[in-house]
Amino acid sequence: MRAFGALVVRDLRLATRIGGEALTLVLFFVMIGVVVPFAIGPDSAQLGKLAPGIVWIAAFLSMLLGLDRLFRADDEDGSLRLFRHASIGMPMLVLAKMLAHWLLTALPLILASPILAVMLSMSMEDWLRAMMSLLLGTPALVGFGTLGAAVTVSLKRGGLIAPVLILPLCVPVLIFGVGAITGLGTAQAMVFLAALSLVTCAFSPLFAALALRLAED
Amino acid sequence: MTQENLASAAPKANWFSRLAHPGQFLAWSRYLIVPLAVAVVVLFGLGLWFAIFNSPADYQMGDTVRLMYVHVPNAWLSQLVYGVMAVAALGTLVWRHPLADVSAKAAAPLGATFTALALYTGSLWGRPTWGTFWEWDGRMTSTLVMLLIYLGIIALWRAFDDQLKAGRIVAVVTLVGAINIPVIKFSVDWWQTLHQPSSVLTADGPRMPGSILTPLLLMMLAFTLLFALLQVLAMRTEILRRRATSLERQAALR
Amino acid sequence: MNVQNALPPRTIEAARLSCRRGERLLFDGLDFTVVPGELLLLRGPNGVGKTTLLSALAGLVRPEAGTIGFSGRSEEDRPGDDLHLMGHQPAIKARLTAAENLNFWADLFGGDRKLVAPALERVGLKRLAGLEAGHFSAGQTRRLALGRLLVADRPIWLLDEPTAALDGEGEQLVIALLDAHLKRGGIAVAATHHDIHIPPPANVRTLTLVPA
């Protein structure tokens, strides 16, 4: 457990030292909220109707941005190879990296979502549900993203491939994520979203660890 | 393959691994090509004759119902080919079988083509029946997502220089995709029931009379054999291409 | 570092080992044994597969044929948690201080944070412990990577060009570290182009790899 915590703390510490990463992501996330009204017009009724979808697309795209760096730095300086000799297994270490990545990329977006909610004239209930659905759904996005990052870590130009690979896999997350904010079956969608996140976070460390091992071999 | 490989594989080989050895595969699969090609031509001839001349037009859809005889086989193949790829992925990861990655690599573009054809014929059929080329119908949507998965896998194959490594990593993605496809289907169906009132005409009627079933089964068999033929040809090409690059490298090293 | 306490004994036995990189067979039919207290030096021209052999011993690369046996490992051990690999890449984070880097590896390897300060002193970086590793020279980074060997007690050391980028004093440091490790009953395999002379009674053998 000490190794798990050490990796999470190290990733968080590195991110704060290098700085700006989380801030840039939040900026990007909010900027989508700024740009969309220019594209579809400032009519607040229409914006409010489209807001759940826009919030999720903004979150989705922001998460894709930070993906490439998930394993790349550790691969380049040789740390990733040494992780194999850690006192805990690679899937656990991948899970630790996922947790750190979620804290660094998803949590700031969730905290920044009120800004987007105000700009897109969402109602209070919609906004609360949006926070809830992001909270439940982003772990699944991180899970699929981790898989994409692990699969492309040995590619020098892998930055483009990973999003293309995981985008179709994330369709259910988007469907249930938006469904949890509006529509008829919000409670049902929340349950599905939580289940999806749980299953993804359980399985993707295994598959990602496998991909990392195969990339080395 | 190297001589060491041959030597180490020889004593413990059972009939299957002997047949599945790339060199052996090249030797015996040669005799499959002509019979398969003949069967494909005959079945297509028969099937198309039944489909065009010897099956009834639908009382609602008219002659456009005949599009079904190409649409349904393609849709079936888009799933079957993914199944073949998933089995090949297991072969790559569990047994590290060299023929498994060749098979997976050959199947991906074929699967993508059949899936694209299913979408294309579907939208041609949709125009006269639903009045639109594209409808966010549950089945069409999940077929579209399927096509995106195929294209992603092809892109991943092409991104790697080392095809052996590519085979293993693509296998991981293929398996994850295989696990995820039912989830995608489920979520799309759920989404569709929320957004789409049941205005869409379902593609298959309640029960099919034999006059429709015969050409449909013939065409499905014809398309499946066509896939088998193309798969064998693509695998042979891939094995030969790998041998050629390997020979080139050995020549360069001397 | 505590020289008195002995390391758990390990023996590496490689039989008919051959490795491949890409399509090229590197070496073939390699047999060797490394017993406690022994250092095996891997020699041979560039591209003969010294690094690949170390990676195979570290469990990162699957050998083409043959077996690698580690005696002394028990069933419940995770394979690899009894060895240190030091490769070309330093695995040092530029934005962490020297001490933070080693603290992290001590935690990750299940070592002891109490070993970090002595380790830094041993590799001659005591004064720089609070400095971010990004400011280090290549040789200092290398010394820090050597320090990682000392923060978790592990009986097997696999070193790839341990003396690269080091000055004469640094080479003496590597030799002293290896000597102390072997005296505790550890084993080491090192790929090197430089001669590493360890005074007797240390047991040093040389394995020269030849291309297949």
Image (cartoon, coloured by chain):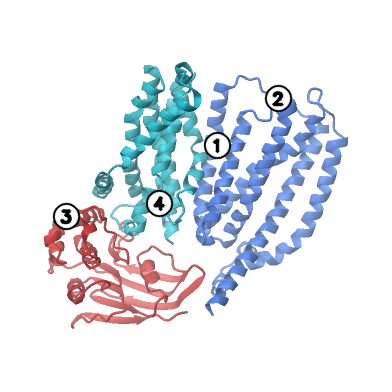
Chain B pictured colour = blue
Q: Quadrant of residue C34?
A: bottom left
Helix, strand or loop under label 2: helix
Which chain does the residue under circle 4 lie in?
A: A
Q: Which mark lies nearer to you, 3 or 1?
A: 3
Nearer the observer, C42 or C153: C42
Nearer the observer, A121 or B156: A121
Marks 2 and 3 sit apart, C-alpha to C-alpha, by 70 Å
Marks 2 and 1 sit apart, C-alpha to C-alpha, by 26 Å
C178 left or right of A213 in image? left
Label of residue B208 in the image: none
A148 left or right of C125 in image? right
Chain drawn red in the picture: C
Say which residue label 4 marks. A209
A20 left or right of B242 in image? left
Q: Label 3: few (<14), some or many (≥20) within 10 Å?
A: some
Give the position of the N terminus of chain C as an image quadrant. Answer: bottom left
Which chain does the residue under circle 2 lie in?
A: B
Q: Is residue B12 visible?
A: yes
Name the kind of residue labelled 1 in the image. Pro
Say which residue label 3 marks. C113
Say which residue label 2 marks. B130
Considering every residue shown, the one lying at the far right of the view is B53
